Structures are given as C-alpha cells and as structure tokens.
Image (tube, helix red, strand yellow):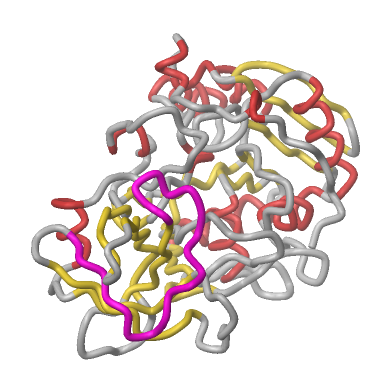
Amino acid sequence: MTTLAFDLPASLEAASPPEARGLARDEVRLLVARGRSCVTHTRFTHLADNLEPGDLLVVNDSATLPAAVDGVRSGGAAVTVHFSGPLPGDLDFPVWVVELRAGPRAEGPITDAVAGEHASLPGDTELTLLGAYPSGNRTSPRLWAAHPDVDDVASYLLEHGRPITYSYVDRAWPLEAYQTLFATKPGSAEMPSAGRPFTPAVLRDLVRRGVFVAPVTLHTGVSSMEAGEGPVPEPYDVPAATADLVNLTRSRGRRVVAVGTTVTRALETVASSDGIVRAGSGVTDLVLGPSRPARVVTGLVTGWHAPDASHLDLLEAVAGHGLVSAAYDEATANGYLWHEFGDSCLLLPDE
C-alpha cells in the first residue's frame, strides 16, 4: 500500500454536484502538478492550456448503471444491494458480484451475511448469496457472488435501481448526474468520475490545441473498498484504433494522458513489458503500484481519492510518490473537494 498519509475532513467531501453549487461541470478547480513538485491552481476549463499539441487524451466511454437496489434481508432488516458487475465465466444463469450495505442509507458494509441467505428486491425478485467473493475470502466477506432471479440484470437495474451513493452525498441525485460526456456503453457500477468535468467546450479547446482524444471501455465495479483492499476485477476493451494512437503518440515523444484510474488500468493491462499497446478485451485483475509501475501512461487526469484507497497506489505508479504527495498536500491545504462531485487534478510527471 501507498505510504501517502493525510487527513480528510468532512468539509472537503463534496456533498453535491458542482451544478448544485452554482458552477458548471467544467468550472471545478484543477490542480496541475508537474515534474517532481511544481504545483499550480486553475479551473478545468483551462485543461487544454496545460497539454501540448500531439498529446493523446484517453477517455472511458463506459456509462453508469443505477446499480443500487433497496431490499429486505430474510430476517426483515433493510439492505441496499450494490451490483458491482457480472461474475466472469460461462455460467448457466446470472451471477453478479454484489456488496450488501445497511440500508437505505448504505451507511456501511454488512459483514454478517452467510451463503444461502436471501434478500427480497423490488419487482418480486429474490437475490441469493452463493458464496464469498473472491472464493477464498471466508472471514466477514464484504463482496458476494449472488444470483438475482432475473434474466437481464442490466435491464432490471434500469427499472428498479438508483445510482450508488454514500453517506457524504446530501440527497438523491438523478442518474444523469453520474454520467460523463463520453458515456455510451452502459456497464459501470459507479461513475468513471475523472471524466465528469469534461464538456463540449473543453473538448473543442483540446481539439483546437491539437490534442488527440481516443476511447477505451472499462466498466467499474464498486469502489467502496476497505483499507488495504485492492480493486475488483473489471471488464475492459481497448480498440485497435486507440492502441495504434497510443503507440504513435509514444513514438513521437508525446504524452499519453489517461482520464482516470479506470483508463490507466485498461491501457496498462494491454501494455507489454517493452511499452507496446495491443488491442484487447477481457477482464482485468491488474493492480498497479510499486511492483508494477505504469509502462505507457505518462499523465493522468484524476479526482481526489480517500486515504488508504488503492487508487493512490495507481497514482504513484504513474506519477511517483513525490509528485502525488505534493499534489495532495496542496489540495488539502487549499480546500479542494473530494469524491465524484469534487475537484480535479492533472498529474504530469517528468518522463
């Protein structure tokens, strides 16, 4: 785990979208950290000013599902089920990885569930816990492989679900608040939030600047990991055109800037040890950190991650401990806002 340590006061947790705070999506603050420790402050509207012609920005085109469903445990207690994603494999019936949280406010993970337990969900649907996920986790598991008795889980969620939210969010917000400009392929349990501040105006400025933009897909699972937990396996797709653009950009000595940890994980999954990216799709269990630094991603647009989150290891795998630490020190000292509705950071380490 990262050695980065900081305190996150409740006052720095964004409780509502910037639009509810009188700002446009692209008017959130942007901290730019360059080199080893050079930090400047601006707004996301000026993202293009901090990139160079020929740089490549890679975005995630995954759309967010309303992946939280309120139900009742077999003993009568309220439960919120977070649908993380389908279990990989050729199965005869739907099996999804889920997290159970104390409902309806989803205050914390439920750790006393047992295999075989049932939960009643809307639409006369029953969820059956099949076993802990991953299968070797036998002590107070937080994630479960579970069978919802519906044929099409994604369609069921669209009818009965709501966006996954946590206690720092002040009220329910519509699904549109959890979609990015690039969202075209439904599948994420939680918003790939680094892309949220992008607007058509920001995109136009990038194009005028000569910055290329290319998509990948990575469907995010639940991100509410406990301290020390790594990311869950997630499905990804890196198209051939994007792989070619990454390789061309690197051959010309320009930056490959990932929009978010999700994009970084997808690109690095298909990056060979010699830094060549090849098109590919599947389910990635890659964990980036000290033992596996980034090979092709040389810049990162990101939100602000909570203390002890595994995402911090990924940031350091791209930008190094010193630059990430300098960025987080500046952000906490200057009142930047955290989480999916918060402010942004652009990490541009020395290559």
Which image quadrant for residue 29? top right
Q: Identify the residue at horizontal 76%, vertical 64% (top origin).
A: 289
Q: Does the magenta stretch include residue 115?
A: yes
Q: In which quarter of the image is the N terminus?
A: bottom right
Residue placed most toward the observer, 269 or 89? 89
Point out residue 100 in the picture as x, y percentages from the top left corner: 41, 63
Residues rendered magenta in the picture: 102-121
Residue placed most toward the observer, 261 or 216? 261
Residue 112 falls left or right of residue 175: right
Q: Identify the residue at horizontal 39%, vertical 72% (top origin).
A: 97
Q: Does the magenta stretch include residue 201?
A: no
Point out residue 269 in the picture as x, y percentages from the top left corner: 58, 70
Which image quadrant for residue 89? bottom left
Magenta stretch: dominant secondary structure = loop
Q: Is residue 221 above or below residue 272?
A: above
Of all residues, the one furthest to the front in this rendering is 75
**Number of dots carrying numbers:** 0
Q: Identify the residue at horizontal 38%, vertical 55% (top origin).
A: 189
Residue 323 falls left or right of residue 166: right
Q: Is residue 309 above or below residue 87?
A: above
Q: Is residue 213 above or below residue 117?
A: above
Q: Identify the residue at horizontal 25%, vertical 58% (top origin).
A: 71
Point out residue 342 in the picture as x, y percentages from the top left corner: 56, 29
Q: In this view, does 282 lie above or below 221?
A: below
Residue placed most toward the observer, 111 or 86? 111
Residue placed most toward the observer, 343 or 349? 343
Point out residue 113 in the picture as x, y percentages from the top left corner: 43, 74
